């Protein structure tokens, strides 16, 4: 028989660096989850991605057990790493802070494909390019489908 779900928790945690301090501790403690057990499991599963921000969706069951799914880093974080920028622009329509190529956009889109709500690489690339533009990055060249 399947376990009954009592709730979900969404977090963004740095890979390999989960600890019971805020924001993880209070978010999981309010649901009755064993915080140290989550931290141990998360850190073990993210040893290869140390320091990268990873979204986590935690499913909490009525018996206080849990399962979690680790997703790929956000497109914004990946774009900032590629462009070697610490943050996006405060005024993305006026002040441009960096440049990315369509090849880089395609690389990020392929990486994020499992987590995006689209079916084709073309639409995934459009989503990533839109994120880049809204952060103040210029997408260089012409789109591969244009």
Image (spheres, rainbow, N blue to C red):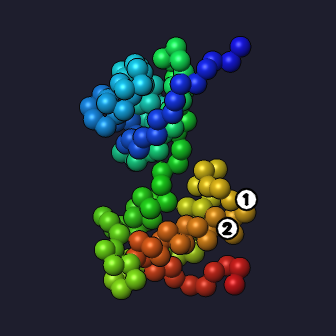
Give 141 or 9, whichever is nearer the viewer. 9
Real-space CA distance between mark 2 and mark 1, rounded to the nearest whole angstrom: 7 Å
Contact between marks 2 and 1 (CB within 8 A): the answer is yes
Q: Which mark is residue 56?
A: none
In the rendered structure, the answer to whether residue 100 lies left or right of residue 27 reads: right
In the drawing, does residue 39 fall left or right of residue 57?
left
Check the picture and name the quadrant holding the N terminus: top right
Label 1 Cα crowd, 10 Å radius (few <14 / some 14-19 / many 20+): few
Where is 50 relative to 65, above or below? below
* Vertical relation: 68 (above or below) 139: above
Q: In the rendered image of this protein, does residue 135 appear above or below residue 78?
A: below
Q: Position of residue 101 (x, y in %)?
A: 52, 76
Residue at the farthest left position: 21
Which quarter shows the C terminus?
bottom right
Question: In the image, 111: left or right of 22?
Answer: right
Q: Secondary structure at mark 2?
A: helix
Quarter-of-image position of residue 30:
top left
Q: Is residue 95 visible?
A: yes
Q: Residue at x 62, y 55 (%)?
A: 116
Label 1, secondary structure: give it: loop
Q: Nearer the viewer, residue 58 or 77?
A: 58
Q: Position of residue 68 (x, y in %)?
A: 53, 31
Residue drawn at point x = 68 percent, y = 18 percent: 2
Closest to the observer: 109 or 36?
36
Residue carrying label 2: 123
Q: Residues within 10 Å of mark 2 (few under 14, many from 20)?
A: some
Q: Please report the residue visible at 41 percent of the width from the left and 30 percent of the height from the top.
A: 43
Q: Give the image location of residue 9, x and y in percent.
A: 46, 35
| Residue 104 in sight from this viewpoint | no
| Coordinates of residue 67 in the picture (x, y in percent) | 54, 26
Res. 119 mark? 1
Examine the rendered structure and indicate whether residue 137 appears above or below residue 2: below
């Amino acid at each position: 028989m399947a376990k009954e779900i009592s709730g979900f928790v969404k977090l963004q945690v740095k890979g390999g660096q989960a600890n019971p301090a805020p924001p993880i501790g209070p978010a999981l403690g309010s649901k009755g989850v064993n915080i140290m057990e989550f931290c141990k499991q998360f850190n073990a599963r993210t040893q290869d991605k140390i320091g990268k921000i990873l979204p986590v969706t935690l499913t909490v069951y009525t018996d206080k057990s849990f399962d979690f799914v680790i997703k790929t880093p956000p497109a914004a974080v990946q774009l900032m790493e590629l462009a070697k920028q610490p943050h996006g622009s405060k005024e993305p329509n006026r002040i441009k802070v960096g440049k990315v190529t369509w090849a880089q956009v395609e690389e990020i889109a392929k990486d994020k494909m499992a987590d995006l709500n689209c079916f084709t690489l073309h639409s995934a690339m459009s989503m990533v390019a839109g994120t880049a533009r809204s952060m103040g990055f210029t997408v260089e060249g012409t789109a591969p489908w244009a």
